[in-house]
Every structure is written in structure tokens, then in C-alpha cells.
Amino acid sequence: MSREALQKAFQLSSMLLVHKTYLSLTHAIIHYFKSLNGVEDVVAYEIFEGATAQDADSIRRFPISLDEDFRDNNSELLLNCITQSQGGVTRCEIEGIKWLFFDVAEKVKPRRIILIQGQVNEEDQTIVEGLYLVYSNQVALLDSKERDALTHLLNRQTLELTLNEIITFYRGKGLSRQLKNSWLAILDIDFFKKVNDEFGHLYGDEVLLLFAQLMEKVFRNTDFLFRYGGEEFIVILNNCDADGAHEVLERFRVAVEQYPFPSGRVTVSTGYNVVDATDSPAVLIEAADRALYYAKSNGRNRIKDAMSLEATTPVLSANKN
């Protein structure tokens, strides 16, 4: 590597270390890759465990596209090639198209891959390979900060960043533009305090962990899952119409009710709301939370849509436990 290239690589590495979130970091490195001569396109992905060439739902594009008719042209390429890549930077040519695979295959789950389409010269590729070490370490560090220590779901601090990303996507499009939209749901474990009081906090933690695992099983990889705090969780459902959102939340409610938790029967109450691009994250969460209180006040183990609540509907005080 020339002295100039070495200096450039050092400056770029310092730039990456400034970023404090995975979203910001990955936007920055995509922007840099797109600036390279010969690069035609750059797209990042998250690859979930168990991905196969027959399972396009096991990948999530970054930045996310929420158009209901969107089809990712790279899905087949990704799923056919991930078994051949062991991580790092790999150059390949497929059907006459040149690619660089920038593959963080270790340290984090889901796996992260950036596809760089085009012909990169040798000096730029050397810089890209050097940046890989910085980026992969930084992704692992940020990922540990952005996830809940117990459940490994995304944490509350990451929720607002993700919601803002989704709101930005929808802004200017209008809810009427699509039949399918995004929905924010708050899931609250009923009578969770009784679990801790009767069985102890170790059993309580086990319930939380199993609950999170059920979320990962029932919801899709294109949805976003969070532990909001205590026994409260949030899921952002993407590309669902109103009936579809209610159906998947009901499927999860039944899955929780039927699951053999070590402490006995557990149920969940849910309040949810459509993601309106004119609202802030705080307003969206408040509306879903109001629907959750209604579900709690009216028997628990049920689902309530915030949009069906009249503005004047009184919500009885309910203990979330």
C-alpha cells in the first residue's frame, strides 16, 4: 500500500470510529463505497440464522425498503453465495458482473453483508480490506450496546432510531399510497410481578427469555423486535394491512398462552397502532400504550387497536402487572 493510500485508510478508519450507532456507521461506509471509482451500487444486508437459497425471507435489506411491491434483485445472489463466504472481503464475478462481498460473518448475529457492485482498483480494494477490520469490530461493539443483555433483542435506546428510519421512509408517501404499512405494537406480559413474587427472579428472567424467543419464532425477519423495559416488549410489523397486523398479533397471543412456561400459564396483552409518518416516535408509542391499557382494563390476554379507540373513550386505570 502506498503512503497516500495508508494515510487515507487511517483517516477513513478514524471516521468510522466516530459513529455511535449501527445505522449511522453503516450509512457512512455505504456512502464511502459509493464514492469509489468503478462502483455501480452498494447495498447492505442482515442475514438471519438458517438462511438458505430457498428462503428469501431470511434476509433484511439495509436501508430497509417498505414498498409493498419491492423485490430485491440481489436476494438470490446472496443466498446462493453466503455458504461459500467465510467472512472478510471477497472478489468474485457472476454472469459477467463484478462484486465485492464485505462479509461480517462472525462476532454478530444476524450476519452482516455489504454487496459492492462494480470494478474496484487494487489500491481501493486494499483500503476496503483494511476498513473491514475496523468496521467488523465496530459493528460487534455497537451491536452489544444496542441489544438487551438478557433477551438479545434490540433495546429501548435503539427503538427511536429505528422508528425514525421507518417514519422517514413513509414521510411524503401518505398512508393511502399503500395497502400495507408498518405497525407498532406493545406487548405486556400479564401479572408478571406474580411470577417474580411466587417463583423468584430467576424464573422471571427465564419467562422473559422464552417470551423473546417466541417473538423471534412467530414474527418475521422483516419485523423489528425490542425489549422496551421490564416485562414490556415492542414489535414493529412491516408490510401488513390492518387485518394482517391483527392476525399475526393474535397468532403470537395464542402462542404465548399455549407455551409451557416453567412458572405455568402466561398470557400477553397487546396494544398497537399504525405508523403514521406525521407522528413522532413518542406519539406512536403513546397511542399504542393507550390501547394496551384498554386491553389490560378489559380482561387482559387480548389485543386492542389504537385506531378503534374513540378519542373520548375512558381508559380505566389498570395495573400493568
Image (cartoon, grey):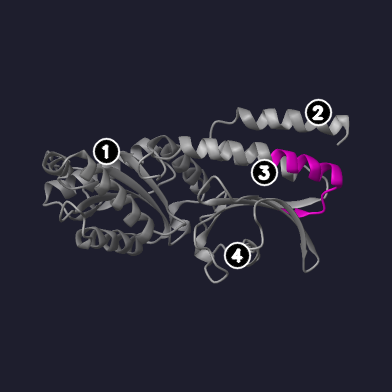
The answer to the question of whether label 4 and label 1 lie on touching residues, with beta carbons closer than 8 A, is: no
Q: Amino acid at mark 3?
A: Ile
- The answer to which of 207 and 317 lies nearer the viewer is 207
Of pointers 4 and 1, the one earlier in the residue sequence: 4
The Cα–Cα distance between marks 4 and 3, rounded to whole angstroms, is: 21 Å
- The answer to which of 164 and 119 lies nearer the viewer is 119
Q: Nearer the viewer, mark 4 or mark 3?
A: 4
Q: Quadrant of residue 13?
A: top right
Location of mark 4 (residue): 79
* Highlighted range, magenta: 116-132
Location of mark 2 (residue): 7
Q: Amino acid at mark 2?
A: Gln
Location of mark 1 (residue): 230
> Residue 128 in magenta?
yes
**Mark 2 neighbour class, 10 Å CA radius: few under 14, some 14 to 19, many 20 or more:** few
Q: Residue furthest right?
A: 2
Compared with 83, 192 (above or below) is above
The Cα–Cα distance between marks 4 and 1, rounded to whole angstroms, is: 37 Å
The answer to the question of whether label 3 and label 1 lie on touching residues, with beta carbons closer than 8 A, is: no
Of pointers 2 and 3, the one earlier in the residue sequence: 2
The answer to the question of whether label 2 and label 4 lie on touching residues, with beta carbons closer than 8 A, is: no
Please give the name of the residue rendered at 82% of the width and 53% of the height, measured from the top-left corner.
119
The Cα–Cα distance between marks 3 and 1, rounded to whole angstroms, is: 36 Å
Please give the name of the residue rendered at 72% of the width and 32% of the height, measured from the top-left corner.
12
- The answer to which of 82 and 191 lies nearer the viewer is 82
The Cα–Cα distance between marks 2 and 4, rounded to whole angstroms, is: 36 Å
Location of mark 3 (residue): 30
